[in-house]
Amino acid sequence: MRMTLQDWALLFLLSLLWGGSFFFVAVAIKELPPLTIVSLRASIAALTLIGILRLQGERWPFARGAILPFFVMGLLNNLLPFSLLFWAQTMIPSSLASILNAATPIFAIIVAHFLLADERMATHKAIGLLFGFLGVVVLLGGDLLGGASIASLGMLACLGAALAYGFASVYGRRFKAMRLTSTQVAFGQLAATTTMMIPIVSIVDRPWTLPLPGLPVIAAVLALAIVSTALAYVIYFRILASAGAVNVGLVTLLVPVSAILLGTLILGEDLARQHYIGMALIGIGLLAIDGRIADRMKGKGTADAPSHAPKQ
């Protein structure tokens, strides 16, 4: 599918929203524990999506056969990756976390190859996987060679989040057969995440004992939930319907750029040369996985394919 000017504008907006999520977490993590932020993000976003469902006149998505899949999706797509990413950002810069999260499509390719009969690894995907792996090695290399460190643990946590997203991208295909809209799926998984997080946060963080955070932290949490989660989901599925899965997957290349700009200009974060080299290698890998450049070089059209874009 060809992208219109509106599609491109929405794609850049989505990259800012998802890139901004790393910035908002970096602000919130200064005063709130990671699991509390996960709980607030999921619950506030779910409440926001209730309003969107009402405005669109859509029904509740909690049919008997959808409840368990919502909980599995909530675990793979929200609870695990959010928790790992937020915990990682207590140890590494938000911009570095966004670069590592860009490896999500690489893990999605691996998971799909082994679990889906119609998603076997093509040559261009294998080449992309190799470049992506080299990029991860460059990102981790210096820290791991010097022994385990706080920074290396944070980077490994980000890769764990990317792996969880990879499983979520495969598992999420089953919702298409349930004839649920994108808003219903987004709300269902966030509601399930909220349900799972309540006992976890109550036991681990006991948030009612925490001091009231400052206004910047409250604003960051609200922006993370409403703007970078609820609104981002709506925009993502709007592009998916208009421009197709392959085109919306380009957001993977743009999210680290916006996250790095926000982290550098506002938070004063600084990345080493190896981090930019690693990001470049992952970017080359993602372009190879995308396949459209190779298709154009061969004079072929690009077929639409399932999206493995990362969520934030």
Image (cartoon, rainbow, N blue to C red):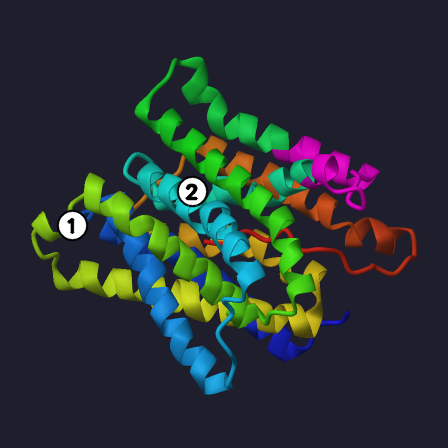
- Is 136 located above or below residue 27 in the figure? above
At horizontal 47% and vertical 40% (from top left) the residue drawn is 161
What is the secondary structure assignment of the residue under circle 2?
helix
Mark 1 — residue? 207
Q: Is residue 178 left or right of residue 288?
A: left
Q: Hey, what amino acid is under mark 1?
A: Pro
Q: Is residue 266 visible?
A: no
Q: Is residue 86 visible?
A: yes
Mark 2 — residue? 80
- Is 11 located above or below residue 40 in the figure? below
Residue 137 placement (x, y as % from top left): 55, 26
Residue 239 placement (x, y as % from top left): 62, 71
What span is in magenta?
A: 112-132
Residue 3 placement (x, y as % from top left): 70, 72
Q: Residues within 10 Å of mark 1 (few under 14, many from 20)?
A: some
Q: Hey, what amino acid is under mark 2?
A: Leu
Can residue 37 be found in the magenta stretch?
A: no
Residue 149 placement (x, y as % from top left): 33, 21
- Is 51 located above or below residue 104 in the figure? below
Q: Is residue 16 left or right of residue 226?
A: right
Q: Nearer the viewer, residue 28 or 298?
A: 28
Q: Residues within 10 Å of mark 2 (few under 14, many from 20)?
A: some
